[in-house]
Image (cartoon, grey):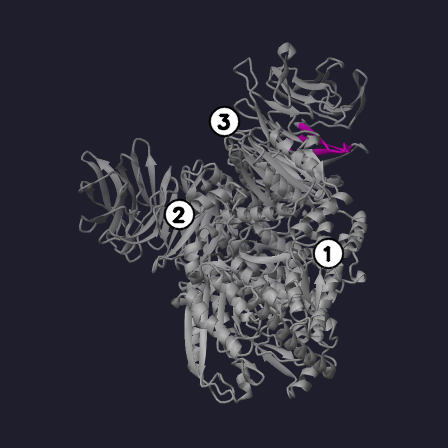
Amino acid sequence: MEGSDGAGSEVGVEVNTEEEDKLWRVLTGSLQDLPPLSSKIVRIFTSSTFTDTTIERNSLMENVYPKIKEYLRENYGLEFQVVDMRWGVRDEATDDHMTTHLCMQEIDNCQRLSIGPNFIVFLGQKYGYRPLPTIIDAKELDMMRECVRDVPAEVELLDKWYKKDTNTVPPVYILQPISTILTNFNNKRHAKLQEADQEEWWDTFGRLCRILRKAAQVLFIAKKLDKDQMHNYFMSVTEREVERGILKAKDVSEHCLAYVREITNINVLFRFAAKFIDFAARNVDGEAQKFLKTLRDEKLPAKCPPSNLVKYTVDWNGKEGIDPETHAEYLKNFMEHFYSSVTRLVDEAMAKYEKLSSDAVYTEQLQHLHACNNSVKVFQGRENIVNQIKDYIQGPSNRPFILYGESGCGKTSLTAKGASMSTKWWPENAEPVLVLRFLGTTPNSSSVIPLLVSLCSQIAFIYGQPKDEIPADELSPLVQHFKKLITFATAERPLNIVLDSLDQLSGADGGHSLAWLPTNLPENVKLIVSAIPSMYNLLETLQALVEVPENFVSVLPLGENLGGTILKFWLKNANRDISTEQWEIVNDALSKCNLPLYVKLVFDEICRWKSYTPIKQTQLHYTIHDTIIKLYERIEIQHGKTLVAHALGYITAAKSGLSESELEDLLSLDEKVLNDVYQYHLPPVRRIPPLLWTRIRSDLPHYLSEREADGVNVINWYHRQFIEAARERYFKNLNFVSGMHANISEYFLGIWGGGNPKPFTYSEQQRRMFHLSDLNGESDRKVPEQPLAFYNEQGEVIRYNLRKLNELPFHLIRSHQYEQLYNHCLFNYRFLHAKLSSMPLQSVLADFEDLMDHVFQKDAKLIADAIKLSSSILGHYPDMLGPQIIGRLLPYYQQNANVRSLIQQCDSDGLEHCALVPSHHCLHTPGGPLQYSLEGHPFAPFGIGTTSNGKYLVSVSNKFIIWDLATSDVFRQVVPGIGGIMQNLVISENDKYAVSYTNNNQVVVCTIMTGDFLVISPDIKNKDESITGTCISVTHVATWTTSMWYLYTLNGKCISSHVIELKMPLLSVELGSDDKTYLIVKSGADSDSDMALEVHDKSMSPFEFHSAVAVSKDKMRVYACIAISDNAVAVYKRETDAWKYDRTLGDNYDAIFSLKLSDDETYLAATIASGYKLWNLQKDTLVKLSLPPRTRNIPNKNPLISLVVFTKQNHFVVAAVRKNLYVWDTKQGNMVKVLDAHFGRIISIDAVTSGGNKIISSSIDKTIKVWNFDNILEDVYSIDRLEKPIEFIHVSDESPYGVTTSRNCVGVWDLNTGKLVYTLETRAVVTLARITKDGKNVVAAETGKLLYWEVEQESSFRSVMQKDVAVLLLAEDDMRVIAISKQIGNKGLCKAYSFPDGETIFTIEYNYKTFKGGCITKEGNFLALPGADKSGDVLGVYQAKTGTHLYNLQLKYTNYKELTGIRAMPHDTNQIVIIDEEKGNILDLKKKTLVRSVMRWNGMAMKTGKSGLYAPNRGGLDLLDLKSGKTVRTLIPRVAEGVFSIDVMFTENDKHVVYYHSGHRTLRVFRISDGTRIANFKAHAEVTYMAGTMNGETLVVGAVDGSLTILTIADPEYDENVEFLQSLPSRKLARNANGMPGEGEVVTGKNSMGTALQVAS
């Protein structure tokens, strides 16, 4: 099978040849011989006689069905539904005689839908109710009338009850509904009248049976009827069901069970015996018993294998016959057998048949192929459009083909017809592939990411591409991958992609922006889409993307004639017709409306018309809407308004449909429905009889569609118009709507699940009828529990309850149950974690957004914003929910009760997912100006820009990333495959194109909406030159070097190249909207700043200036420094061919580095060394914007680049200086805020003033930050950090302090609060620091000396000269400092100093080959210094207290390798370990011996010295036994994770191992006792150093951004760890002296100098 080699396992599970063939046919789009749809339900039809199996059926309902439901749901995620058409129904006779027909329909449905068992029969000694045939062939009944013509009364009776319908082809006689003749048959309000009519009916029924059966026998004898035709008049409902469900069924052993029960010694004298055996005229009905015997004892055993047929014999009991107490043993055995048999059949079916069905791509395509076939079956006409589709398929177009039209116009049928024909329109030798999706009909076709994953998986399989390369989580790479996959289509195997109803896609992930849709198609690929033009501006968007008018086809109504033709065709296929008089009514209606949906509704209506239907009952409405409303009305009249309104109301209210068992459960919990249904009798179990919903559904043919949602089959309205009509009819009463949503939310909360009885109130009528003394009752409704997840026996999650996660918030919001919503969903850790773990992050945010659309909730907004800020981590690490929420929201712990509750849950429930918990506020809080932190560029994004509508942000590095600014999602990622890094970004005026140039002389043009790109490589004549800039207009691209510029068309064709005259270096080229090209050249020497503005066509004289320039957009005004006026800024206006002086903007004596005009040209900002100058150009006023002291601007190499922007309406001016953003108000010039925006230099800045008020900054740290300036003055909680990366940490043993070093600063931190309490700044480079046990003093090593600091004074009180200290230790209870340094010429120096005096105690000099530091043994006995002498590598061993040299230990033991490190053993006062590249070697310095070498060991040991670690930098982590060297436990398997730096340590209490992996940027914590990983903590920035506290419960982590994060190891296994977490000051509800919350400092930012830094993490 070509194309599938090696790909069979890519899509699904292992499959055999037959299944492989099936898989191939489905995935390539073959519509012939489609396999049936796989199902997500076990749906069993239970057949039994009416009265004799009540006890058994009630026992199953009470005890067995709930257990089976639970088993199937937990083990396979399957729904379970029992169709018991007798249960809950009191009377065998129904008014419309439809029960038998409905039973047959339901058996067919069960056989079609069910996995495993689908039919179970219970047979006793009763043959059961034998109904009259509802429909009899006209010829047959005419023969029967002939038989009885001599008895006029019998002929009259037949003619009265059977009417001839000539609308059926061939004609039939139809048994009339009882109430049309006996009008009080259903009149429950008048019991006597009803009783009389019912008595008359049963008498009539008996007479009709006798007439028909006698006639049938006569005709059989006359050989005018065969045996089966005759038996049709004698057959019971039960036999008919058994015939359909078993006798004529396939694979009975896999799908059917039969239970036969014989009661011995039935006492037929008891009246009650009639329930158990057939009686006729007060005697046992011999005829019925004969039929039963044949069925039960002959037909059934012949078809049903012994393993599936069970017989029970029981004794008759007293009056009751079967009694729960007497027959308890029988019932127990019966129920056990039933449970085990059903579960066995399901287990077997899942093992045998569900291999393919578990393949999501197979099941997805199969659903759409079935939908296509169903549409095509009834398709007629529209040849002109079908031919246009054919011309497109066969034509050269490489753009999509679009069908558009209003709702109900038949787009879907046309799309289906086109799809079904498309594979036939390619050349004969081709094997075309059809990939088809009717969007919105399945969950995987309802939103963009699942849709694309499904399409990619299918196309990858067909063309033999690996499935594991599909980026399933992120939209942008997914879109790129999709586009790449369709390029594999070939002439031999071309690809047709058909996507119907773009309007049905969710708007999430840019569904309606259509950026994901390929618009330039590769060869051999055709794409057909359809849409409603008015929805979401889809037509407009498509026209912008696909600029080929002939590819757009409008789908109009059918027209009256075609409508009539289609109706006749459909009627013929259905073996129906209508009378001439009825045709007149139909034609009149079609002249008013002939939309296909209307024609379909008319067809379904006229199929109900009989030839004898009175004309007043054959009226049609003239709109789709009115026709649907009429349909609902009719169903209400037929089945009861309450039941219908609630059933259809639930379906309409559901977010994504309801499964039938969910609907039955909801109706069974709905007291209004049950009180209506059970007005006149009491059910044994208070549930809705399944028959009632079945009857309603049967009257809504094809209008309810089945689809899959959240892993189950759900029903929903098949067309938008039905939803709208249902909402209008049932949802006008807001209390009713709210009640519907409240009931659904109560169901998904599981309040009445798992056997919890629900109370109810008896109606007055029930109490009177049944003589009830109690007003209230309660009843178990047999509905399932609703946990968030299902677990296996080991406690592992097998699957999440997606139905609950998806539906519950939706309904709680719409029923205004906000407290329940907060408690169970939005402020519930377990709910949020489950949803993040099983659904896209956007669906979690959608719940919060949904709430905000209804009501504002401050805490909900905080949490939603926190999740948004954490999206880049939570999208991949949902277990980080707790740490992210805590780290961001701890400052709100005091004031916000809901936030506090969520944090407390994170501190308890969250520990099972990540037990490494922030001790303090450590991440940027939501609510301030930072809106998003965008990560995704592997290199610094030098160019950023936004579209003019503020919708998209475009950024570049070695790729383009286009972000949706509304959601922060990646809208598109374009990887042009260039070698270099892009250096700038310019977006065309029409927002269509973005252009950039790279550092290896390429120009890249990207189409923003489609992602198409073009790489231009200019032919640069001077090889010493590089491209220095690009610009773009709506038609052309220009690029330049210092000596030339080049002009290209947008498709990359070079139009011209131009050399700059006089060899003046070119700084800028701009393509003006006036079709002129403007150049700025450097006109002076390298050392000066003279420049000139020229027009390329020389239509204007050059304009000369110096230092800086700003030119208005329309090129009519220039602002610049003119030589004659020194540094003053002059304004010049353009007049025809010259620049004329206008005015000078006051005096300015400061050198100007650059100028920046506001967008509306009302302000001009000049960059100067000490800050900025801001001119109001309307008033010609000047304000100075000062930078803080010691902060200066330096000139940019290119004076045309300015890192200054203006916010919306020019309220603020924002400037980027190094890593900070400084904000001033434009009116007063006051600095209102300093944003500590990045931890690397800011390289680009942009403003969004349309559709928002945002500032965007990008940095050398590879991040892009989006700042919402509507929030610029909001309170901000500061996070302390050092300016440069933390390089070293030392934690005090006894006080709550730690010291850190960054390159220029020593920081002292209070570990109780997470605050930086003191900074000890130095002018030299700091390398190491140690803090004393009491936390009062610090010893720090600078480049040339040691400094002793008194912490509280923030000043050094002593300095000791010693250069290049590499090891710094405190010893002798902090009374001694030991410093080891490298000297010139491979000399080592080790000195000991007293503390605090700084006196030298001893000096040791020694030689080394390679410096390896040194160490002191436990309790300070020995000092060990690795060195070298003539004999080779030695270990110098000294008395640590005095420095006395004891001996040199020659390192010549077996397998000696050059050492890489040295450290003291933690458990022995005499032992150290020397580490080399392959092992750790334990030396006893007292005994001067090698104790042992341990292979693979890295030298890290537990305090006991028993265990060590092996952590290679290629991945993997083993716990080693240091005696045997064997692996005790593998903590991380050796999975290749790339070569990265690894840091690993034991905690001080020997309970945990901490492992940091720089590639993943994760801290993993393992419990040593059992090897369980208790945390996989994703750090916010690269970790540079980590240390633990003495109690082993806290981890202190330093990062590249200068932050110090303090994390508690709150292992839930150890109570003391959890108690320690609860005891932290950040978890206390205390307030400090000034009344502010104790955690975090609020900075209002409203003062003129916002000194506090707001950190963006």
Amino acid under disc 2: Asn
Question: Marks 3 and 1: in contact by CB < 8 Å?
Answer: no
Residue displayed at 43% across by 45% down = 20
Q: Which residue is mark 2?
A: 16
Tag of residue 1326: none
Q: Residues within 10 Å of mark 3 (few under 14, many from 20)?
A: few
Residue 536's x, y, as percent?
70, 44
Q: CA distance from mark 1 to mark 2?
A: 48 Å
Amino acid under disc 3: Gly
Q: Which stretch did the figure color magenta? A: 1154-1176
| Relative horizontal placement of residue 1647, taking residue 1220 as reference (left or right) | right
| 1171 falls in the magenta region | yes
Residue displayed at 75% across by 63% down = 633
Q: Which residue is mark 1?
A: 606
Residue 646's x, y, as percent?
68, 66
Q: Nearer the viewer, residue 1636 or 1343?
A: 1636
